[in-house]
Image: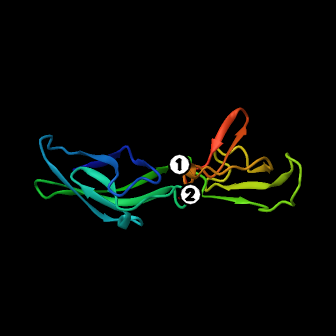
Amino acid sequence: PTDLTLSPASVAEDQPRDTVVGTFTTEDTDAEDTHSYRLVGGADKALFNIKGDKLVTKAVLDYETKSQYEVIVEAKDSGNLAHSETLIINVENVNDAPTDITLSSDSIAENEPAGTVVGNLTLTDPDGVGEVSINAIPLIATSLNIDPSQVGVKLWEFEAEYDVKSSPAIG
């Protein structure tokens, strides 16, 4: 073997174990030769595995933690000749859902008129600003009715810039 490549050499973040990162291609002067692959090193060797001619993940990778990983892969042909290559794997950022929602105040004096601000909702987004266009939303006092059939369906919903935003199901 004279060269080894991985294509594509990238994976979206938050994918499960055994997600395919890419497929190996080996250049060899013996065109009909077959090749086997193995991980021989690299700073991030423990996070990857080889299945046939594919590099797969052994862990869930997070872009916000680390966006590039390095492995050294060896390609060996049927004549037991080998070539090693350092490969860089890029982790692609995806928009992560907010991880928390907090209310600045959870009480209001009795007999306040409708439209009184109770508090602000603040979303915690692991991507920083990301796709979240509103960080604090005033919660306005109106009549509150809890429908028992909807418990666990939706924590909050509000209108912002002509879109309705909702929480994920809770419970």
* Amino acid at pointer 1: Asn
The residue lying at 80 percent from left, 62 percent from top is 107
Q: Which mark is residue 124?
A: none
Q: Is residue 146 visible?
A: yes
Residue 27 percent across, percent down from the top left: 24, 44
The residue lying at 42 percent from left, 66 percent from top is 43
In the depicted view, which residue is nearer to us: 77 or 66? 66
Residue 80 percent across, percent down from the top left: 13, 58
The residue lying at 84 percent from left, 51 percent from top is 117
Colouring convention used in this rendered image of the protein: rainbow
Q: Secondary structure at mark 1?
A: loop
In the depicted view, which residue is nearer to us: 10 or 32? 10
Circle 1 Cα neighbour tier, 10 Å, few/some/many (<14 / 14–19 / ≥20): some
Q: Which mark is residue 64?
A: 2
Q: Are marks 2 and 1 in contact (CB under 8 Å)?
A: yes
Q: Secondary structure at mark 2?
A: loop
* Amino acid at pointer 2: Glu
Q: Is 130 on the left or on the right of 67, as rendered?
A: right
- Number of numbered markers: 2
Q: Is 137 on the left or on the right of 82, as rendered?
A: right
Q: Is residue 96 visible?
A: no
| Sequence-earlier tag: 2 or 1 | 2
The residue lying at 35 percent from left, 61 percent from top is 58
Residue 52 percent across, percent down from the top left: 21, 52
Name the residue beneath numbered marker 1. Answer: 93
The CA distance from mark 2 to mark 1 is 8 Å
Circle 2 Cα neighbour tier, 10 Å, few/some/many (<14 / 14–19 / ≥20): some
Residue 131 percent across, percent down from the top left: 64, 44
In the depicted view, which residue is nearer to us: 26 or 46? 46
Q: Is 7 on the left or on the right of 130, as rendered?
A: left
